[in-house]
Image (cartoon, rainbow, N blue to C red):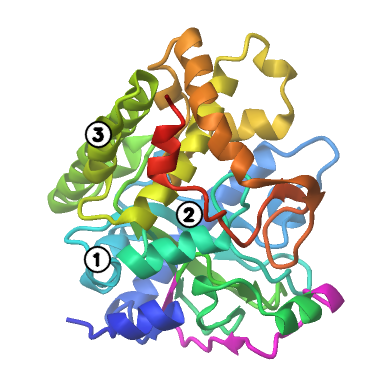
Amino acid sequence: MMEVDRQRFLEEGYVILRQVIPPDQLEELRRVYEILVDRQRAIWARDRAPEDPPGGHWETAAQPRLTLTSLAGEIDASTAGAVEIWLHENTHGVSSRLLGVEDAAVTEMMLMCSPVRDHGPARWHRDFAPGHSSSVMGYAEDIRENGPRYVQWNLTLYDDDVLWVVPGSHLRPNTPEEVEQLRRNDRAPLDSGVQTHLAAGDGVAYILPILHWASDYSTRLRRVIHGGFSNFTHYPDPRFCEHLSPGAQATFERWRRRSDLAVDHVETALRAVLEGDGPGYHRALEELHPGSGPMAKRQSTIFLSKSARDIRNLHHPDFESLPQKDRKFAAMVHPMTLQWGPRLGDRFSDAEAKALWARFEPVDRSLQGEEEQTFPGFQGRGSRYFFNEVPESLTVDGFIAGWA
């Protein structure tokens, strides 16, 4: 069993592990993933826009990225190993221990590739936007109290030193020095940053919302298995399971059933809000995250306010008239933030969707300022939502009291 120091992981926000991919499996995994790269390239060439070059997205992207669940029909006996690596003790077992759960579920499975021309460095960022999830300290206080809800991985098929991280930044806002550096140049090394040097087969696991940076989108061959684990998952096309081993199929089925139950618990929580049932709301939050404390319940309430907004938007009488970003997020499934798209929204009537948003809208307002603001080191750009703090006045009990 691979040794991991969970306490250090919780404090620093990342851990580098050597030979996560067993050396005797590395060449075969390279071969398997390259088959999928070729199949994805053919799809991108076929689906390219009229103004695109012959290779489509493969030729235009700074970081061409394969998503295995989107390639579900391409997972066969020759490529099943691309999925099976996510079930290895060095990935699944380690992730469960890092998250502090018995059976973490694969939430995302991807492959990041080098581009066909140099694109230079990306921007320093945290993998979320507060308008669609929470602020830094919403995450941080939940992590301190209950541990992380998601662990993200980079597994390298070839030597890789592209990723930089800022240790401990998952538990705090950017420092004034970091803000100054990022405003000056958010595509350059930070003084507080650490470059990860991974040999082929090594991995780095990290906690969102850690501040991190992809330092070099160059043509140097890059194949990085990327994705993560949480308690819940969502696979819109389960065909990728057909060619897996019986044990792997059973594992994915177990995760699917657990996630279906999570959708039921979210619905129960939202209906408790509609019915003004405070104890029922607390019980539903406890079902979602057993043993969770007040910070976890507050964070879940923030996430559920986004779900309520999405449900309201899905039931909008003229959905197509909404801004493109609102339509996109209303349809999106993001299990880590309890957002389940139409799968959840279709369980509510138009009247219930309107009433539900009326209950959650005060939560949403409390997370915003009067004017749009910008802050370096985040996905997206300007927002009225607070990037760093959660107002002290926002509590679950205060939310419930507001229903009276």
Q: Quadrant of the C terminus?
A: top left
> Residue drawn at (75%, 74%), measured in percent from left and top?
121
Chain-order first, disc 2 or disc 3: 2
Disc 2/disc 3 C-alpha distance (Å): 49 Å
Picture layout, residue 145 above or below residue 290: below
Disc 1/disc 3 C-alpha distance (Å): 30 Å
Q: Nearer the viewer, mark 1 or mark 3?
A: 3
Q: Nearer the viewer, residue 134 or 338?
A: 134
Residue 167 placed where, x, y %? 52, 83
Checking the image for residue 96, the label placed there is: 1
Disc 2/disc 1 C-alpha distance (Å): 27 Å
Q: Amino acid at mark 1?
A: Ser
Q: Kindly state the secondary structure of the residue where label 3 is placed.
A: helix
Residue 338 placed where, x, y %? 41, 41
Q: Is residue 49 left or right of residue 18?
A: right
Q: Kindly state the secondary structure of the residue where label 2 is placed.
A: helix
Residue 375 placed where, x, y %? 75, 63
- Indicate the quadrant where residue 266 lies: top left
Mark 3 crowdedness (10 Å alpha carbons): few <14, some 14-19, many ≥20: few
Residue 339 placed where, x, y %? 45, 37
Look at mark 2 in the image and give the residue it sits on: 36
Q: Kindly state the secondary structure of the residue where label 1 is placed.
A: helix
Q: Which residues are magenta?
A: 183-206
Look at mark 3 in the image and give the residue it sits on: 279
> Residue drawn at (50%, 58%), measured in percent from left and top?
138
> Residue drawn at (45%, 22%), measured in percent from left and top?
345
Chain-order first, disc 1 or disc 3: 1
